[in-house]
Amino acid sequence: MAKFFADAHEFLPILLQGVWLTIVVTVGSLILSTLLGMVWALMRVSRLRVLQRVSAGIVNGIRGIPIIVQLFYIYFVMPELGVTLTALQAAIIGLGIAYSAYQAENFRAGIEAIDKGQIEASESLGMGWALMMRRVILPQAVKIILPPYGNIMIMMLKDSSQASTITVAELTMKGQLVASSTFKYTSVLTMVALLYLIMSVPLILFVGWLERRMQQAK
Amino acid sequence: MIELTEVHKSFGSVEVLRGVSASIRRGEVVCIIGPSGSGKSTILRCINGLETYDGGTVTVDGVRVDRASADIKSIRTQISMVFQRFNLFPHRTALENVIEGPIYVKGVRREEAVPRAMELLSRVGLGGKANAYPLELSGGQMQRVAIARALAMQPKAILFDEPTSSLDPELVGEVLAVMRQLAEDGMTMVVVTHEIRFAQEVADRVLFLDHGTILEEGQARQVLTTPQHARTQEFLRRVLTPI
C-alpha cells in the first residue's frame, strides 16, 4: 500500500499530462459530434426525402464501422488524399464523426417523441418548418434528449482512450508507456483506472440528477 | 368563403371522403355532425391543409388550399383551428401561447401583441391565468386558452374539431358559452361536434356526414328537429336518447 502511494507520487505528474489530453480529446469530439449530430438529425426529420435518405445512409455507415478503424482511416488514409492532420486533430475529428451518429439518433428520437398535436397546432397557426422546430419542437425535445446526452458524454470520455491507437498521448497511452517502462503495472494501471473514475463519476452523478429532474418536470 | 367541391380523400385503401361538397359563407356557423369515422375531422383538416386531398377542390376566398403551395401560410393565418386535445404549447404560459402566432408568424410587435392577448384571455374568462402553464389549468381552461390563441390571429373563420369531446362533462358548458358568444359576435365557424343542443341553438346550418358523404344538410333547427333522411333520424335518436 505504501508502495502504491510512493509510485503514485512519482508518476502522477506524467499521468496528469495524459489527463489533460484526455479532456481535450473528449471536449473537442463532444462539441464536433453534437454539431454534426444535429445536422444529421435535422436532415432526417426534414420534409425532404433526399436529405432524409442521405442522413440515414451517413448515420448507418458510421455506426457500422468500428471507431478504431475510423480513427486509423482519418490518421493514415487522409494524408494519402492530401490532408495531413496531427494525431490530436485526427482523434478529435475521428471521434467526433463516430459519435455524431449516436448523437443524431438521440436528437431524432427526442424530436420524434414530441406529440404530433404540437406540429398540427404550429402548422395551423401558419408556422413554417424552421419556425416550428425552433419555437415549439426543439425546446420540448431538449428535456428528452438531455439524459441520454449525458450518457453519451460518459461514453465519449472512456472512448477517448481509443485515441491512443493513433499515438495521442492521452491518459491510457501515458499509463501504458509508464507501466511498460517501469514494469509497475499494478500501481500505474490502478492509478489510470482511478483517474478515469475521478473524471467519470461526477458525470455519472450529474446524469442521474438530470434524469430525476426531467422526470419531475413531467 | 370556404368552398368544398366533390372532395375525395383516402387514407391508404380506406376512402374517407367520397365526394363532399359544401359551402360556408362569411358569418355563418355550420355544425358538422355524424358518427365517428364518417370523415368530419378530415373535412376540417382539408380546409386548412393539415391533410391533403385526392380529388375535388377546396378553396378559401377563391384560393385553392394546397398544403405544398406557398399560399398555405396565408390561408392558415386567416383560418384558425381549435383541437379536441387542445394542443397548447406546454412549455409556454397561457399568455405566451396566445402571443406566439401574432409575434412569430404575423410579425406583430410585442408591445401590441401582449395587451391584445390579455384582452382575449379576459374575454374567455381567463384574465387571471395569463402566467399559468397549461399543466396548471383544467381542460376547460386549456380549451379556452386555445380559443384565445385562435382568436389572436384575427382569423376570418375558426374551425373547431370536437372542441368539447375531451372535456369533463362539467367543463363543457364554459367552452360552449365562449363559442356561443363568438357566434353571436359574427365569427364564421365550422364546428365538428356531438353537442346536438349546441348545434340546435347556435348553428345556422347543420351537415350530417355518414361514411364520407353528406347525407343531409339544411337549416340547423330543421335538420335536427325534423330530419328527413332515415339515417339522420336514427343517428339523432341514438345520440339524444342513448338509453
Image (cartoon, coloured by chain):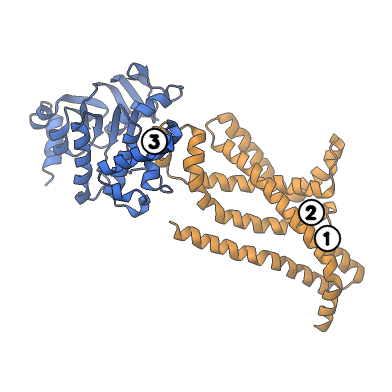
Q: Secondary structure at mark 2?
A: helix
Q: Is residue A143 above or below residue A56?
A: below
User: In the image, what residue occupies the spot 15% across and 30% down?
Assistant: B231
The chain coloured blue is B
Q: Secondary structure at mark 1?
A: helix
User: In the image, what residue occupies the spot 53% across and 46% down?
Assistant: A109
Residue A120 in view in this figure: no
Q: Residues within 10 Å of mark 3 (few under 14, many from 20)?
A: few
Please, what is the three-letter code of the amino acid marked with disc 1? Met
Q: Position of residue B12 (x, y in %)?
A: 40, 30
Residues marked 3 and 1 touching at CB (< 8 Å): no
**Which residue is label 3 attached to?**
B112
**Which residue is label 1 attached to?**
A173
Which is nearer the N-term, disc 1 or disc 2? 2
Marked residue chain, label 3: B
Colour given to chain A in the rendered image: orange
Residue that extends furthest to the top in the rendered view of this protein: B62
Task: From the image, state whether disc 3 or disc 1 is nearer to you.
Answer: 3
Q: Which of the 4 image quadrants contains residue B28?
A: top left
Q: Is residue B142 above or below residue B19?
A: below
Please, what is the three-letter code of the amino acid marked with disc 3? Glu
Give the left or right position of residue A67, taking residue A139 as reference: right
Question: Do marks 3 and 2 share a chain?
Answer: no
**Which residue is label 2 attached to?**
A163
